[in-house]
Image: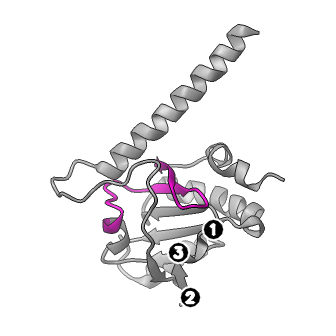
Amino acid sequence: SCIGIFYMKTKALIIAFLYIAVSFLVLNGCSGDNKQAIRTGDTLPPFSATDLDGKAFSLASHKGSPVIVRFFLLNCPYCKADTPIFNKFYDKYRQKGLEIVYINNNGTSSEEVKKFADDLAVHFPVIFDPEGTIAKQYNIKAQPVALILSPEHKLLAALLGGVSEAELNELLGHYFQG
């Protein structure tokens, strides 16, 4: 019916507006520094780091594939609750090119971050960035946040707090169909 179609279009517009608003707030923050905020639609600059297993991780090496860059905190209930969702999504789509990387900058040591990753059986690279270099590069002001990137590494959304499977499917699912 017309009312149902109107409701669906209105809901889609509201969701799109919320993604853009949250992306702006999370990436722009309230700081007084002059660093340019990353905005929805911007191409993220590459970063490179070594993960907890000693393997090199480079965002640039995943060009052509969707990527989720998740800045997480060790004491965060959202991070513990949604890690199984990220694991499931990764297991489902990694053969189709999906990459996920977790980045932590609030741990006291790499061992502490590794324990978090081991306890939650994280299936993808985890980076300990004690200086917060990568978060500063992206002007991240609030955590946890998941940066959802297209295959061209354009920012599709910045999801603050917990992330649901439905959100991941809505933002990235169409890249894996067919």
Residue found at the very far right of the displayed protein: 178
* Rendered location of residue 125, percent (x, y): 58, 76
* Rendered location of residue 80, percent (x, y): 54, 59
User: What's the distance in space between the residues labelled 2 and 1, CA to CA?
Assistant: 14 Å
Closer to the chain start, of discs 3 and 1, is: 3
* Rendered location of residue 90, percent (x, y): 69, 64
Element at badge 3?
helix
Q: Is 142 rendered above or below residue 99?
A: above
Element at badge 2?
loop
Element at badge 1?
strand
Label 1 Cα neighbours within 10 Å, binned few <14 / some 14-19 / many ≥20: many
Quarter of the image where one finds residue 55:
bottom right
Residue on which disc 3 sits: 60
Closer to the chain start, of discs 2 and 1, is: 2
Magenta-drawn segment: 136-161
Q: Is 14 rendered above or below residue 151?
A: above
Label 3 Cα neighbours within 10 Å, binned few <14 / some 14-19 / many ≥20: some
Viewed as shown, does residue 98 lie left or right of 138? Answer: right
Residue on which disc 1 sits: 99
Residue pictured at 48% horizontal, 77% vertical: 127
Residue pictured at 30% horizontal, 49% vertical: 28
Q: Is residue 149 inside the magenta stretch?
A: yes
